[in-house]
Image (cartoon, rainbow, N blue to C red):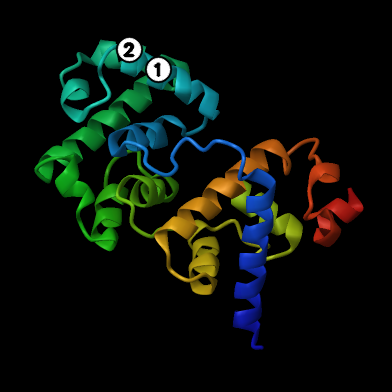
Amino acid sequence: MDAGAATTRDLMALYGELDALHAWRGWHWWPDADPFEVIVGAILVQNTAWANVERALDRLRAANALTPEAMDALPGAALEELVRPSGQYRQKAKKLRAMLALAARHGGLAALLALPAPLLRAELLATWGIGPETADAIIVYAAREPAFVIDAYTMRLFSRLDVGPVTSRDYATWQTFFTAHLPEDRDTWARYHALIVMHGKHLCRKRAPRCSQCTLAARCPFAQTD
């Protein structure tokens, strides 16, 4: 077996172990989340915990503001107040406005999300306030096209396992590693990212990791030295 095939087998084995550990947990974007709510959540979760995003989403729902049309009709101060629990609320309100403007330029959200994934990604990255992680989350969870999302949880887990480009913190480098070694499948990539996030939140934490509860510990150099 060549090195590439071995890496693919290893990554899929890790996927299976993560699924066994976390399949019972809920995931906020799986499998049939509303696309606009995904987009709003992907923007609001920047630099904050998901619990804070949930509070903001609850306020938006209560105000009947979780559609592009309703949100666009809100006065600026009202939108800022609704998303306040997510932190950096003025900046995030502006980012939501920029996203609404992008959708409007393409004739609506459905038309925007129907763009071919490479073109959609380019359009998202050209929009103020949207970086690679947010763009890829929108593509895989809202447009439901293949994209492998990279985040701090991914780099932490796989660096601790000594799998992948562990000396790099470059988004594209990590993303290429996964997309080169995993079969392109939207559902698998979406689920893999979800499992990584859940593992990072609940077990492979930055501080006080719960290695004793992790079935990956036997093969994890970090766990062996912790």
Q: Which mark, by number, is residue 58?
A: 1
- Which residue is the extreme one toward the bottom? 1
Compared across the picture, whether 13 is left or right of 140 comes to: right
Q: Residues within 10 Å of mark 2 (few under 14, many from 20)?
A: few
Is 56 or 1 nearer to us in this picture? 1
Secondary structure category for the residue under label 2: helix
Is 134 or 191 nearer to us in this picture? 191
Whether tag 2 and tag 1 are in contact, CB under 8 A, the answer is yes
Give the image location of residue 65, x and y in percent: 25, 19
Q: Which mark, by number, is residue 44?
A: none
For residue 9, what is the image quadrant? bottom right
Residue linked to disc 2: 62
Residue at 43% x, 68% y: name it. Answer: 184
Q: Please indicate, yes or no, whether residue 55 appears anywhere in the rendered image.
A: yes
Q: CA distance from mark 2 to mark 1?
A: 6 Å
Compared across the picture, whether 44 is left or right of 198 comes to: left
Q: Is residue 106 above or below residue 63?
A: below
What amino acid is labelled 2 in the image? Ala
